[in-house]
Image (tube, coloured by chain):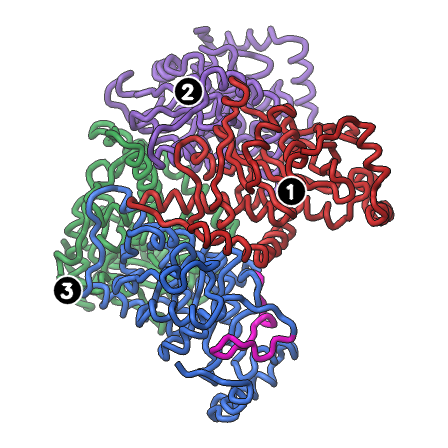
Chain colours: A red, B purple, C green, D blue
Amino acid sequence: MRPVDSIAALGRARTAASPASRLLRGLACAAALGAGAARAAEGVPAALVDDLVAANHILADQGVVDGFGHVSVRHPGDPNRFLMSRSLAPALVKPDDIMEFDLDGNALDARGRAVFLERFIHGEIYRARGDVQAVVHSHSPAVIPFGITGAPLRAAYHIAAFLAGGVPVFDIRQAAGATDMLVRDPALGRALAATLGAGPVALMRGHGDVVVGSTIPMAVFRAVYTEVNARVQGQAMALGGPVTYLDAAESEKADKALDQIHLRAWDLWKRKAAEAR
Amino acid sequence: MRPVDSIAALGRARTAASPASRLLRGLACAAALGAGAARAAEGVPAALVDDLVAANHILADQGVVDGFGHVSVRHPGDPNRFLMSRSLAPALVKPDDIMEFDLDGNALDARGRAVFLERFIHGEIYRARGDVQAVVHSHSPAVIPFGITGAPLRAAYHIAAFLAGGVPVFDIRQAAGATDMLVRDPALGRALAATLGAGPVALMRGHGDVVVGSTIPMAVFRAVYTEVNARVQGQAMALGGPVTYLDAAESEKADKALDQIHLRAWDLWKRKAAEAR
Amino acid sequence: MRPVDSIAALGRARTAASPASRLLRGLACAAALGAGAARAAEGVPAALVDDLVAANHILADQGVVDGFGHVSVRHPGDPNRFLMSRSLAPALVKPDDIMEFDLDGNALDARGRAVFLERFIHGEIYRARGDVQAVVHSHSPAVIPFGITGAPLRAAYHIAAFLAGGVPVFDIRQAAGATDMLVRDPALGRALAATLGAGPVALMRGHGDVVVGSTIPMAVFRAVYTEVNARVQGQAMALGGPVTYLDAAESEKADKALDQIHLRAWDLWKRKAAEAR
Amino acid sequence: MRPVDSIAALGRARTAASPASRLLRGLACAAALGAGAARAAEGVPAALVDDLVAANHILADQGVVDGFGHVSVRHPGDPNRFLMSRSLAPALVKPDDIMEFDLDGNALDARGRAVFLERFIHGEIYRARGDVQAVVHSHSPAVIPFGITGAPLRAAYHIAAFLAGGVPVFDIRQAAGATDMLVRDPALGRALAATLGAGPVALMRGHGDVVVGSTIPMAVFRAVYTEVNARVQGQAMALGGPVTYLDAAESEKADKALDQIHLRAWDLWKRKAAEAR
């Protein structure tokens, strides 16, 4: 965990941005985006904002999110900030809806835009996990049953090999007693991040799940196939008898292969999302 | 029960309308809607008719209704009247199809338009429940199984927290013996309203369900997530072993949070419904 | 059963057509349809051909048929003939694809068009059932499981009340030993019609089902809700414990109500099918 | 196994092509396709490339493939070569993406295009099975459960009669110990081909399946209905009690009937795929 103690510290971090990030910032300012979009995404390449918007649309198109759920990316020029849309259904997100937050969940340039109650999920995971660059939170419908029963989510096929290390379940009741189930403050965010540990996915009891990745496409890929795998596993369990899941050695190797091939799905999804809009 | 004894009584009720409702009526008359629409929605803001039409389309788009089902709203200027489309598949409803009814289910200005056999569901619930402003009746497909088995519908996740108080099942056989299953008179409507009690949802055995809310968006939200929760709960039960549902304290808090966030889904659905037409 | 012994008998039947049917024939010839369409639908009102084409599209849109399946209507001017498309996926059927058959399954004006191998399903049901005016045969996917297990298909809700009289299963193996499962001759058609008896639906083991009605909209309505009810019933059974189905008295009454309301669904489906093409 | 030792050997094989194949090649060169497309499909009728592109789109439209999966056809002029798209999501494949491979999986004219890691599935099946002209590999979602449980996939209805001979499961762990689950070399391809044997379908444990046919439409037809049958069979098993599948005599006859009727589905799917693009 690398806490950021104050807004002032964040200011210093911004001043200390690398030459590369300063260059990127300049490019973004010069881009043909509207002034609002440029401000919302200060120092962020337009292509990254474009991917973040696409991620919102893809997650909706693939049935991972409905009117709820959110996806964020760590700021490429400042590890203590992240980018996420204002409070809005993911299918409707446009570049100008992207806002910048610090890891405490403070909006840096709100301009009156409403923010997600659960932005602390993102901030605290970025704080705890230096390797994570993108976070998806959803009420992925086929996944919820695995969070409210004793049935562990496992890797039914190689495309979901990333699940094989075990998928922990975050029970907010154990962390904080009776709540409204929402991760609505930093402490709950930290508790969730602690349950996630070093893994790619954590289920949230009676709520949904959180999925992380080293890039936006990887986090989206994992979120989609966590949902698909949940459907496949549920059907396999319904056939009766023992189910053979990927074993540890297979999963480790298969997961590496996903690094090579996951962009094939991302390219398809991004194209389809653009065509549908 | 506050019966309206005659059309004349209704005329008096209209005369007694508040200044605000008279103003609204004037606005509606001046609106660019066709004369038919203006008459159908006398004294009703165009935005409310628009929301009621959208509710019809949303419920179809979300798979809650098919060719059957209906949604109504209490008249904003007269608590003893409600608005609902003529007998028509919800996906096809347009502003001019909206009719006005008294709580006994009499159409106030039918002009030859056919009415739903089960309009008594709406009238009797509005009569019994002063807090209810909108009612949805559907054959929500994933919900029907819970009405014909002993399995109680429960809140599998926070978005369906409103189910946690318990979902009663109305068995028309117990109320009236052998029927055609339709709530086709005031007495059956009253029996259904009695089963609903003070809750948001009642299942109807061998038929479907009824869902209420304090606004159109809230009733639609609950209808959609009653269906989604039924799918999720069925899948959780199929995994075997005990299922952990939201407990009473969690549900109460989570339900309050829905007041804040449900419009995010409504905004998405309404936009999508408009784009699809 | 009213057998037609020969083509000559059919010729006589045609000569004996009523004045009304002769008038209709004249109207059809004068219609703006192409000559092929006029010939294919001799003596048939254009509106009936239009409904038959719509029925094909609706059954595809509603997931009752895929590339396979067919729907027919009895000739309005000659009870010993019926109308059905040439061998073609239902979604692709156009007015000019409609052909005329006698009850033995002979095409009266083939003009080189390929015919369905299983046209005998239609001819033999029309022969055995004077009350039937329309027949649907499909591989309705949620229905097939009920034809290959001991689980009887029953009315889970009032919209499927027509199922409550019991749904027989036709096992072609018992009728004819080892076959290719196709009802490809009159004898098999008669055996299927015998299993159907006086009911609205018969399942076909390892194959699909056949559904009949007194009109095209009623047969299509029953075919769609046989599929929907099968899905609902399967889910109810999966919840465990006893399921309460409509009882005999309820079903009889509810089925009568469908006479009143089924056109609401038909109007929706026909509109949607037209918009999609 | 008939290995092709070098590009030179392939050159000889090409020289030895039949007059018919030389003619086809000439036609293809004269075709109105871009130079890239002509080169990619040297000696291949444009109609075959068109069918292969359509097969990619159909498999995506029917839910057999998602971002992953591939379909190939044996080269009509040289049995030691096959055609398949570059590494790309099937829904996005265009004629210019079609590449030519030898049976060892070497691209004959890569021009920098990325190739599928698992092209060895195709090469080794073409080598082992002279009767096979088309191969589909997918992660067909309803089929995966049958590959990871002891439940054998069987013919629930006549359209899937081709499954009745038994569907073997290829467990890569038994062939090669701990792998990344991918058939990424000729030896693994040969092991899979050996499991397939003389049949039409083999499941791949924790991965998906492979389906073959004597034409592109037949392989696609079998791939689609393997998926549909898996859904139907899973639902039948869930109803409880014994399931009656097609027996051996029925299946053999029903499978022959598919030769006659499968193009009805292909024509529909190809039309829909073209309309959607």
| Residue toward you, A45 or C27 | A45
Q: Position of residue D190 (x, y in %)?
A: 40, 72
Question: Do discs 1 and 3 share a chain?
Answer: no
Return the residue nearer the eye: C249 or A61.
Answer: A61
Taking the image as shown, residue B257 lies to the left or right of residue D177, namely right
- Look at the numbered disc 1 and give the secondary structure of its residue: loop
Same-subunit check for callouts 2 and 1: no
Q: Circle 2 — which element?
A: helix
Q: Mark 1 points at which residue?
A: A132
Q: Residue at x 58, y 62 (%)?
A: D92
Residue labelled with disc 2: B121
Between B233 and D225, which is closer to the camera in this rendering?
Answer: B233
User: Which quadrant of the figure contains the C terminus of chain D?
Assistant: bottom right
- The image shows residue A224 at horizontal and vertical percentages of 53, 46
**Label 3 lies in what chain?**
C
Q: Is residue C156 left or right of residue C31?
A: left
The answer to whether the residue labelled 1 contacts the one labelled 3, judged by CB atoms less than 8 Å apart, is no
Residue that badge 3 annotates? C5
The image shows residue C53 at horizontal and vertical percentages of 41, 55
**Please, which chain is the residue tagged with disc 2 on?**
B
Q: Measuring 43% from the left and 14% from the top, which residue is drawn there?
A: B124
Measured from the top left, where is residue A101 in percent x and y? 74, 33
Quarter-of-image position of residue C82: bottom left
In the image, which is nearer the foreground, mark 3 or mark 2? 2
Label 1: chain letter: A
Disc 2 residue type? Answer: Ile
Q: Is mark 3 on a helix, strand or loop?
A: loop
Residue drawn at 41 percent across, 76 percent down: D126
**Is D101 covered by the magenta stretch?**
yes
Q: Give the range drawn in magenta.
A: D92-111
Q: What residue type is labelled 1?
A: Val
| Amino acid type of the residue tagged 3 in the rendering | Asp
